[in-house]
């Protein structure tokens, strides 16, 4: 039986790397760059750090595009275009080929020595069996080569990069579009929102409604027909391929329809409190199986869980309930279609969108939700100081201005503040997010800032992304300043 020859593999490499002959062909053709681009470039060009960068993230968030943009930037920065290799391992010609073999063929084409400084990008690396072992070998063998491995089967990448690549791999998560990025892609910049000392809130709210329904994926945002073809672009490629192909193949799931039913149930109930018993009843999946499936869905960046404390921020001995959020609210649109801002479901999706910005925070692990009195009182988000286990940030999400007029109806927030008098301190922050209303109300002797949710998401995601490596910055520390400008606008 005939086998693929080295010459055929090298021809494919030449086809995939046209910049070897003409550096201008290294141009990516994409004008929009993710906000994580500069940080990713910095990580890649740290030659004193002997690690491969493993680029992880859901499907369709722009991993391959960002790799092409990095290649374009390297050429613009005067790196020799012949020192850059890109290989997408989902191509049949590379099937079963070890990474070291591809490197040898690349070096043979250009006569590179073993000590030359090179850049090597392996896209869709999960198509190579035991990829983490092979990647570790080439990282150890070629100290002057900077390696990037990426793929959409995020569950496998996340799991195996930690198990087998300790000290050799550096994970880099590319999440769905944040609201700040979405606005910038749409040309809605901070400057365009400002009119002197005033803020134009209406266009930001309109953008937020679009973001909730369609905003997580760059291709959808950029394409003029993105929202019309959303079900095919996202539903089929992101949801179906992950649930019906990627995860079953990675974990040996014999009944992928069970996994699909569970995800559909979770997506429809995003931002709701759930427990294993109710999930089993509604999805018709056994509880022990659900435990495993939740881990798989979380590893694949489709959902995140938020755990519960009571009004005194005490954990429960048996954590039988928790909240589940889609990592991107628009995944629900892919399954069930878009919702209008007056739809009863929009409030939960707006909360999911805020959660999506929060999930990028370095402090995400410090966040919980509070619920007590037999589930009759709740606060959406509580951030606990990791040293003293005291609440330092409290946020209640409402896509409405009703509670600004009647703050006493925020029963959960009232009860929580009464149980935690230390929130009266000046270094504590308590927010009730609204649709448009802004101002302070004193609740249980605590100053609560009512503030538009869309602007809070914009500012949260801006600081988390722009100050990606600056830890200790409170994302919402300057809301009071913005609140005064909004009051002037009104």
Image (spheres, rainbow, N blue to C red):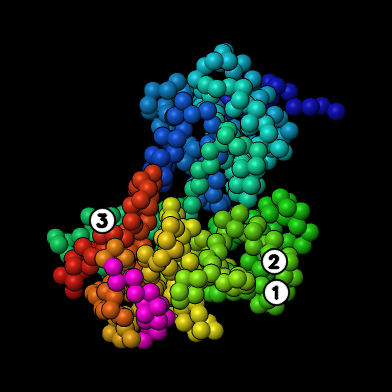
Say whether residue 90 is left or right of residue 65. Answer: right
- On residue 328, the disc is none
Element type where label 1 sits in the image: helix
Query: Disc 3 or disc 2, which is closer to the eye?
Result: 2
Depth check: 257 or 296 in front? Answer: 296
Element type where label 3 sits in the image: helix
Residue underneath mark 2: 290
- Labels 2 and 1: the sequence-earlier one: 1
**Circle 1 residues within 10 Å: few <14, some 14–19, many ≥20:** some
Q: In 3D space, how far apart are the residues under numbered discs 3 and 2 (Cα atoms)?
A: 43 Å
- Labels 3 and 2: the sequence-earlier one: 3
Q: Which segment did they paint magenta?
A: 409-425
Q: How many marks?
A: 3
Look at the numbered discs 2 and 1 and tell me whether their residues touch, using CB distance below 8 Å.
Answer: yes
Residue underneath mark 3: 190
Quick one: quadrant of the C terminus? Answer: bottom left
Which residue is at 56% across, 55% downward?
301
Asked if residue 252 shows in the view, the reply is yes
């Amino acid at each position: 039986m005939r086998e693929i020859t080295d010459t055929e593999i090298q021809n494919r490499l030449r086809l995939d790397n046209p910049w070897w002959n003409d550096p201008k062909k290294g141009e990516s053709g994409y004008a929009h760059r993710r906000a994580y681009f500069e940080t990713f470039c910095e990580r890649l060009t740290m030659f004193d750090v002997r690690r491969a960068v493993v680029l992880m993230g859901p499907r369709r968030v722009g991993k391959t595009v960002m790799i092409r943009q990095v290649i374009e930037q390297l050429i613009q920065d005067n790196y020799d275009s012949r020192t850059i290799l890109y290989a997408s391992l989902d191509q049949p010609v590379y099937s079963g080929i070890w990474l070291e073999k591809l490197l040898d063929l690349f070096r043979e084409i250009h006569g590179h020595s073993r000590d030359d400084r090179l850049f090597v990008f392996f896209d869709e690396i999960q198509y190579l069996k035991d990829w983490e072992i092979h990647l570790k070998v080439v990282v150890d063998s070629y100290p002057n080569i900077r390696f990037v491995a990426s793929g959409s089967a995020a569950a496998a990448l996340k799991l195996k990069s930690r198990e087998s690549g300790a000290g050799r791999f550096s994970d880099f998560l590319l999440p769905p579009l944040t609201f700040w990025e979405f606005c910038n892609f749409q040309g809605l910049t901070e400057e365009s929102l400002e009119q002197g000392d005033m803020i134009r809130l209406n266009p930001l709210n309109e953008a937020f409604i679009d973001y909730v329904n369609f905003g997580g994926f760059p291709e959808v945002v950029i394409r003029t027909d993105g929202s019309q073809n959303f079900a095919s672009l996202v539903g089929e490629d992101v949801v179906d391929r992950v649930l019906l192909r990627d995860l079953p193949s990675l974990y040996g799931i014999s009944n992928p329809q069970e996994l699909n039913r569970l995800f559909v149930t979770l997506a429809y109930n995003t931002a709701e409190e759930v427990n294993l018993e109710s999930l089993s009843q509604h999805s018709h999946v056994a509880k022990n199986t659900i435990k495993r499936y939740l881990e798989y869905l979380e590893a694949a960046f489709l959902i995140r869980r938020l755990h519960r404390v009571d009004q005194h921020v005490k954990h429960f001995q048996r954590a039988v309930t928790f909240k589940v959020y889609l990592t991107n609210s628009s995944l629900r649109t892919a399954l069930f279609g878009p919702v209008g801002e007056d739809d009863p479901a929009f409030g939960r999706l707006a909360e999911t969108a805020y959660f999506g910005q929060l999930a990028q925070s370095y402090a995400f692990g410090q966040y919980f939700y509070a619920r007590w009195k037999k589930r009759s009182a709740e606060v959406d988000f509580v951030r606990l100081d990791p040293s003293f286990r005291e609440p330092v940030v409290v946020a209640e999400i409402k896509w409405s201005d009703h509670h600004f007029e009647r703050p006493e109806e925020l029963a959960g927030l009232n009860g929580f503040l009464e149980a935690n008098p230390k929130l009266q301190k000046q270094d504590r922050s308590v927010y009730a997010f609204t649709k448009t209303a802004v101002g302070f109300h004193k609740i249980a002797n605590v100053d609560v800032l009512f503030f538009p949710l869309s602007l809070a998401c914009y500012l949260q995601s801006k600081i988390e992304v722009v100050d990606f490596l600056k830890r200790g910055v409170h994302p919402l520390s300057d809301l009071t300043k913005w609140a005064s400008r909004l009051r002037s606008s009104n």
